[in-house]
Image: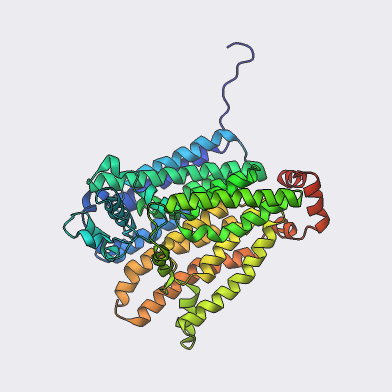
């Protein structure tokens, strides 16, 4: 061997990481792919409970499999603790890609949204109609349309960029339902892996020793993989753009960060709650009033141009937004539904007001954090989104957890990451509660519905809230207590304070 040449060193965490990845893949194959193969069921409208005849064995396998996957994900975070060896990143993301391919072949067992994506894409590209206003039922003779089921009579609730992204596979797949399903799932799976990489890039700037763990939490999280790939929800597209916006802010490109967040809002509008936090952070990074004015003028004009251009093909007056707003008229798995079920005296609309008032206090705290530095922005985005879903929304779906978990993965604090794991586990179990327990107790029994609804909400949000309140890092608390003098020093030194924080 020539002098100076060395054998490449194997990262110490790699063997353990590969064992965890292999065990996770085994569970995805045995519990999901074996039981719910896409190739067998893709042409019918059926769910997890019906496929397994609502058996206790089917329930136990799903609950046990999901729980083990979360244990393995948590073990991966433990294996990576404190490591910043970049050689591990390809293994983390490569393992996630294997999970994606496996879950792309799993039937969407708890949601039909991906079928609605295909129908709205066909309406747009084949029939040249506006899917926001024209529902699948308008083309009843088309063999693809019936699989939209409950959405067949409704227009699309997504923004224009969401419609365009959902339609990307159709020029290649045409009217082939199976090809559309697989391509959509693989596309969303690629976005899951890409989100893990973006989270890694964000944390390299803020806290490098947390970067690998953030990539793993984002790309290996069972809820994100199950809802984003197996069920095929376009929330992963929205969150990829939001994370790219965060990365742009962290890297100092403030205007691009705002534009990317606008793009996320044009997929689904949920990320609009992050815009004030982005603006507060950006304005506090600029040294003078003139610089702030220039930033606001440029960012607002470009954002308006992007929004107008995106809607140019779909806009038909204010009613274009009406269906989007109607999505929060139901009461499911939400703070308001639990309060109403428990008290029996507070109407759902009043419960919703109480939840939104509580969210207002948490949101104010998130705004405060966003003005304190980069890590404060990341933590503020997570808390604002968690509070929005936990308190403000009246209709909460399990795949909304994609928003929460991907933002938690970008936070360099243990409490937020641990809390997001508890949340994602509880939200994932909710699929089994509704798919099995509700049927066992009687679908027409109001008490059965209230029990399953309350159980899902409490198991999802209460453990997370406890972790955030009781086990929040001292470093995270101290971040909120920095004096005004520290903030002034940051402005004068052009970001030097953030650089110091990143090295702590």
Q: Which residue lies furthest to the bottom in this view?
A: 345
Residue 45 in sight in this render: no
Residue 294 vertical position relative to residue 8 in the rendered view, above or below: below
Instruction: Write the residue at 20% across / 58% down.
Output: 139
Observer-nearest of 62 and 121: 121
Query: Residue 163 location in percent, x, y?
Result: 37, 52
Observer-nearest of 160 and 403: 160
Q: Residue furthest left?
A: 141
Residue 135 vertical position relative to residue 300 in the rendered view, above or below: below
Query: Residue 51 location in percent, x, y?
Result: 25, 60
Instruction: Write the residue at 63% across / 58% down.
Output: 277
Identify the coloring.
rainbow
Q: In this view, does 83 lie to the left or right of 137?
A: right
Q: In this view, does 95 lie to the left or right of 127?
A: right
Q: Which residue lies furthest to the top in this view?
A: 2
Query: Residue 383 location in percent, x, y?
Result: 60, 62
Q: Quadrant location of residue 9?
A: top right
Observer-nearest of 473 and 162: 162
Q: In this view, does 430 lie to the left or right of 245?
A: left
Observer-nearest of 413 and 384: 384
Residue 296 vertical position relative to residue 363 in the rendered view, above or below: above
Query: Residue 153 location in percent, x, y?
Result: 27, 66
How many discs mark residues in the rendered view?
0
Which quadrant of the figure contains the N terminus? top right
Residue 230 in sight in this render: yes
């Amino acid at each position: 061997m020539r002098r100076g040449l060395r054998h490449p060193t194997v990262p110490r965490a790699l063997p353990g990481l590969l064992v965890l990845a292999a065990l996770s893949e085994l569970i995805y194959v045995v519990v999901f792919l074996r039981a719910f193969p896409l190739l067998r069921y893709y042409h019918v409208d059926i769910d997890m409970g019906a496929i397994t005849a609502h058996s206790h064995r089917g329930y136990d396998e799903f609950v046990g499999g999901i729980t083990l996957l979360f244990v393995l994900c948590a073990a991966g975070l433990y294996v990576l603790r404190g490591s910043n060896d970049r050689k591990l990143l390809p293994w983390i993301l490569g393992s996630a890609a294997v999970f994606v391919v496996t879950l792309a072949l799993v039937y969407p067992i708890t949601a039909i949204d991906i079928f609605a994506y295909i129908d709205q894409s066909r309406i747009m590209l084949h029939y040249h109609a506006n899917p926001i206003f024209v529902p699948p039922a308008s083309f009843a003779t088309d063999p693809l349309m019936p699989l939209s089921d409950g959405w067949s009579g409704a227009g699309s609730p997504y923004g224009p960029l969401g419609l365009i992204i959902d339609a990307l596979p159709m020029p290649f797949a045409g009217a082939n339902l199976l090809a559309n399903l697989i391509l959509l799932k693989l596309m969303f799976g690629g976005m899951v892996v890409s989100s893990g990489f973006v989270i890694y890039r964000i944390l390299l700037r803020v806290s490098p020793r947390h970067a690998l763990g953030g990539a793993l939490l984002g790309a290996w999280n069972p809820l994100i993989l199950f809802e984003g790939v197996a069920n095929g929800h376009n929330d992963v597209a929205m969150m990829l753009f939001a994370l790219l916006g965060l990365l742009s802010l962290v890297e100092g490109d403030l205007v691009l960060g705002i534009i990317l967040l606008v793009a996320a809002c044009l997929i689904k509008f949920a990320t609009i709650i992050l815009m004030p936090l982005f603006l507060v952070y950006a304005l506090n990074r600029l040294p003078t009033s003139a610089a702030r004015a220039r930033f606001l003028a440029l960012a607002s004009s470009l954002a308006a141009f992007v929004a107008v251009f995106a809607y140019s093909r779909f806009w038909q007056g204010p009613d274009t937004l009406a269906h989007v707003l109607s999505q929060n008229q139901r009461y499911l798995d939400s703070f308001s539904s639990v309060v109403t079920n428990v008290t029996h005296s507070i109407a759902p609309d009043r419960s919703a007001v109480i939840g939104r008032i509580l969210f207002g206090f948490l949101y104010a705290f998130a705004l405060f954090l966003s003005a304190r530095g980069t890590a404060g922005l990341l933590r503020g985005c997570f808390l604002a989104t968690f509070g929005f879903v936990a308190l403000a929304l009246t209709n909460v779906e399990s795949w909304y957890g994609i928003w929460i978990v991907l933002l938690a993965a970008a936070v360099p604090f243990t409490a937020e990451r641990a809390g997001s794991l508890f949340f994602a586990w509880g939200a994932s179990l909710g699929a089994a509660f509704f798919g099995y327990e509700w049927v066992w107790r009687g679908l027409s029994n109001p008490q059965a519905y209230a029990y399953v609804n309350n159980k899902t909400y409490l198991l999802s949000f209460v453990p997370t809230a406890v972790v955030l309140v009781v086990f929040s890092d001292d470093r995270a608390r101290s971040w909120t207590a920095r004096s005004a003098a520290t903030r002034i020093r940051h402005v004068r030194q052009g970001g030097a304070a953030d650089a110091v924080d990143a090295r702590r």
